[in-house]
Amino acid sequence: MPEYTPKIGLPTPLGNENVSLAAHKGLITAIDNIVGNHIEDKNNPHGLTVGQIGAVPMPGADGLLRLGQTVLADDVLPKSAVEKILYVSTTGNDSTGNGTKAKPYRTIQRAVDVIPNIHMHAYTIACAAGTYPEEVFIKGLLGGSVKIQLDGIAPSAKDGYTGLNVLSILAEECMCYIQINDVDFYNSSTISRNAIIRFTRSMYGAVNNCRFDSDPKVNGKYSVLYDASKGNIYNSYFLNQFTCLRAQSGSQVIWSDNNTHAATKSDFGLSVSSSIVHKVGALNLNATTLETTVSGGVIY
């Protein structure tokens, strides 16, 4: 009598048995049927559960991508980009909020974290006026764009406070367009990073209508730092900073003549190392050292 395999019960002859041609063909046919049915079954042939494979964090009804849900969903790789707005308010809630106007998030970081790493949408994080004691971290986004700005029409940063107060913002390894609008940075000397706004190994970062008047000199913080990144700075206001713009490690940055600087001087205006900074029109800076270049840095 033959023995049987423990998994699917196929017969195997004993050592003292002879196998007929018919039995051999029968065994091959059985294997072909089992394997063939498995290949043809495209709907979870292994019977895996969500717990076995793990759920992938995604925005949605419950925030998870479930077994059987298509990966190429609209939130990940849509056929065409659409504008998506995520609302944030100091009266919101990161746990019960869903990013809508009626149920905003409490922190900017929570809004950043629900954006898929791969997407083609134009996301706007619209923040109600208030103080957000956050060092926001944007990491590894690919495709589309992300804007952080005041919800509504923002006052000019050149004329006074914008009403949107944040500690610092760091974008790292993002292959997309990122724009920081309308932010009034405060307590800058206390931040853990070496720059108030920093773009590191990122495709393009724009700074618009932002206000840098919180003195970071005591700890030598840069106002805006581009590190192996591209971008531009415009319509922004500076006062008594350590260095208004630092560009390093092959960065390319545009400095617009519609930026302004108050009467109290900064230590350095433009500091460029192994990078290129393009000045559009007048420099419009007030610094002890307006321009400095090292390691092949160039200012046009």
Image (cartoon, rainbow, N blue to C red):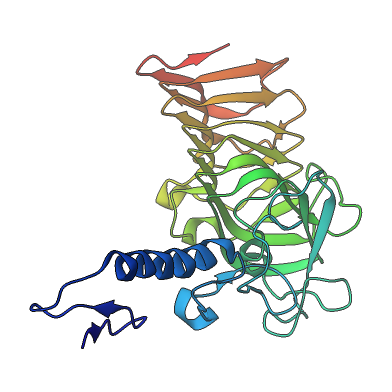
Which residue is painted at 52% across and 79% down in the image?
47
Number of numbered labels in the structure image: 0
Question: Is residue 136 in sight in this rendering?
Answer: yes
Residue 142 on image: x %, y %: 60, 45
Which residue is painted at 79% across and 74% down in the image?
104
Residue 54 on image: x %, y %: 49, 75
Q: Quadrant of the C terminus?
A: top right
Judged from this view, the residue extending furthest toward the right is: 153
Which residue is painted at 68% across and 50% down in the image?
119
- The vertical placement of 7 against 175, above or below, is below
Which residue is painted at 41% across and 21% down in the image?
274
Left or right of residue 1, residue 279 in this image: right
Residue 49 on image: x %, y %: 52, 81
In this view, the residue in front, 32 or 55, is 32
Judged from this view, the residue extending furthest toward the top is: 300
For residue 50, which quarter of the picture?
Answer: bottom right
Residue 229 on image: x %, y %: 52, 32
In this view, the residue in front, 218 or 4, is 4
- The vertical placement of 91 against 225, above or below, is below
Question: Is residue 179 in sight in this rendering?
Answer: no
Q: Quadrant of the N terminus?
A: bottom left
In this view, the residue in front, 59 or 68, is 68
Left or right of residue 137, residue 1 in this image: left
- The vertical placement of 151 against 155, above or below, is below
Judged from this view, the residue extending furthest toward the bottom is: 1
